Structures are given as C-alpha cells and as structure tokens.
Image (spheres, rainbow, N blue to C red):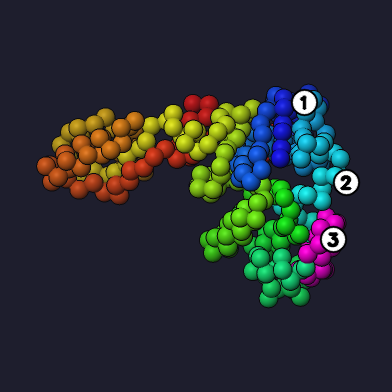
Amino acid sequence: MIEVDALNVRYGDFHAVKDLTFEVARGELYALLGTNGAGKTSTLEVVEGHRGASSGSVRVFGRSPLDRRAVRPRVGIMLQESGFSPDLTARESVRLIGGLTRRSDTAERVLGVVGLTGKAATRVAQLSGGEKRRLDFATAVWGSPELVFLDEPTTGLDIQSRDDLWAAVDRLREDGATVVLTTHYLEEAQQRADRIGLMHQGRFHREGTVPELTGTLPATIRFGLPAAAPALPLAATREADGRLLVRTHALQRDLHALLDWARAAHVHLADLEAGPTRLDDVFRAIGG
Ligand SMILES: Nc1ncnc2c1ncn2[C@@H]1O[C@H](COP(=O)(O)OP(=O)(O)OP(=O)(O)O)[C@@H](O)[C@H]1O
C-alpha cells in the first residue's frame, strides 16, 4: 500500500527526515512513533501528499501521493488539528469534508460509527474537545477508505471514548482497511500495531514487530522492600519511586528465585510487578 524509499525532507538547511525506507502492506496497522521532533509529521505529510519530498521515492497504491486524483479518493486522513468551521453542525461538517473524497456515505452512518448520532444537529463550536476528535475520526472514515491515517487519534479522549474509537478501528480493519497510526500513547501502539517504525532525529532507531523491538532489551521485575529486609538474591537498582528494579533475560527463573527468597525470609514485596519489556523501555533506551 505504501512504499517509502530513501526519503529525505529538508527545511532550508535543516535535515528533518534522513534516508527513511519502509513499507506498509495491505491490511496492516503500522505505527510511526518517535521522540518529539523526530520527523513523523514531516514523513506523513509527504506520504499523504501534503508536501513533496526533498529526495527519495514515495508510492501510495503504486502512485505518487501528489497524484491526488488517483490517490485521495482511496484515503482517509484524521489530522492532529481539524479545520472545522465552528458555525456548521456535526452533520454538515462530515457531509462537507466527506463529500470532498468523492466516496459515497451518509452523515448518519459515520456519526453512528463514532457515537455522535445525538450531536448531529449541534454546532462544532458547542462540541467538547473529545467530541471534536470523534468528529475528526468520522470524516476520516467517510465512505470506508482503503487506507486510513490516524495522527494521534486518541489525544484528549477519555477511556470510554478511546475504547470506542479503537473498536471502530477494529471494524475498519475487519473490512480490510490499512491503518497508519502516530501516537504518544505507547501502550496503544504496543497492543495494536502489526509493525512499528520508531523514529529519532530523522531516522529509524528501530523498525519491526513489537517482539522484535522489545526482544533485545531485558524484561523487568519491580517491587518495594521494607528497610530491614535481608540482602537480595539478585542484583537490583533503585527506581525514582523508591522501588527496586531487576532487569533480566530469564524472567521466569529470576521471578522464582525472588519469590522463593521472599517466602523464606518472610519479606513482603510491595507493589510487585513483573513483565516483558515495554515500548516505554525501548523509548528510554534511545540515545542512552
Ligand atoms: N516548516 C518547517 N520549517 C522548519 N523546520 C521544520 C518545519 N516543520 C518541521 N520542522 C522541524 O523538523 C523536525 C521534525 O518535525 P516533525 O514535526 O516532522 O516531527 P514529529 O516527529 O512529528 O514531532 P512531534 O512528536 O513533536 O510532533 C523538527 O525539528 C521541527 O522543528
């Protein structure tokens, strides 16, 4: 669906995206993640056809994304900030923006998808931040596009609205849609992405499936200990919250050793947590 080959984006002397190469296959959910200023938005702007590349090749459905007549009708885009007119109602907004895609759909259907049926006649100015975000999503899914770009889709949404939005994304994917996602909520990407491109300073720091990204870093065990506890059977460091942290490539073995020791020594392990490496840990390892 998307082929990016040696993409470079420059703003004057500033080199924002450096020789980036990746592909997104039909039906995939691909998450483009990264540190602030890493170049995600610049990359997506080129892939979405909003700006040209400084050099390199980008193909969407095998065509240049600048070929808007061929590409745009097959794509839905949820931008970070929408340009809704405050005086239009929710129904009028989705009709207007949806109409530009030349796909057919109804305002009733897309507002239903995002749970805004009851707000169809409400002016945009009177919608809450979360409701505007859902209206953004409604315009992106107008006419069930084959390829959907979601730029920080859940920012500003409460947990219920987030779950509802992800359920709507799942339905899109069941219908065969390909999704490209950016988010700063790493857990959402870890749970849902088939593959992740993790950017830092214009390049991929890592790219692959979640297990590929997390597999090279150790798993973690975290717990609190009373001051009078005897010496631990494992090497641990102290976290900012006062808990101890054990890093291990043998999680089950070391967890057994810790629990056996705690039982024998009658020590309570407070707030015990053990788990695989999280994407957060991969992020923290960037540059360090
Ligand atoms: N129009 C522009 N002119 C000059 N520099 C720009 C322009 N747009 C972006 N940049 C710079 O290019 C770099 C990449 O920006 P970009 O918005 O692509 O990053 P990002 O990964 O989306 O960041 P964030 O997570 O903070 O939104 C940043 O250093 C930014 O300051």
Q: Quadrant of the N terminus?
A: top right
Q: Which residue corresponds to mark 2?
A: 69
Task: Give the spatial CA distance, label 1 vs label 3.
Answer: 32 Å
Find residue 56 and name its label.
Answer: 1
Is the CB–ligand 1 distance for label 2 below 8 Å?
no
Q: Mark 1: which amino acid? A: Gly
Q: Front-most of 207 and 198?
A: 207
Q: Which residue corresponds to mark 3?
A: 99
Say few, some or many: other residues with alpha carbon within 10 Å of mark 1 (under 14 / 14 to 19 / 20 or more).
some
Q: In the image, is residue 103 part of the stretch drawn in magenta?
A: yes
At a point 66% along the width and 65% down the height, the residue shown is 113
Task: Give the spatial CA distance, label 2 vs label 1.
Answer: 22 Å
Write the start and end of the magenta stretch as one range. Answer: 87-105
- Return the x and y of residue 15 as percentages of the image width and height: 73, 25
**Residue 171, placed above or below residue 19:** below
Q: Front-most of 71 and 128?
A: 71
At a point 81% along the width and 27% down the height, the residue shown is 54
Which mark sits nearer the N-terminus, 1 or 3? 1
Left-right relation of 261 to 190: left
Q: Mark 3: which amino acid? A: Gly
- Return the x and y of residue 228 as percentages of the image width and height: 16, 41
Q: Secondary structure at mark 2?
A: helix
Find residue 222 and name its label.
Answer: none
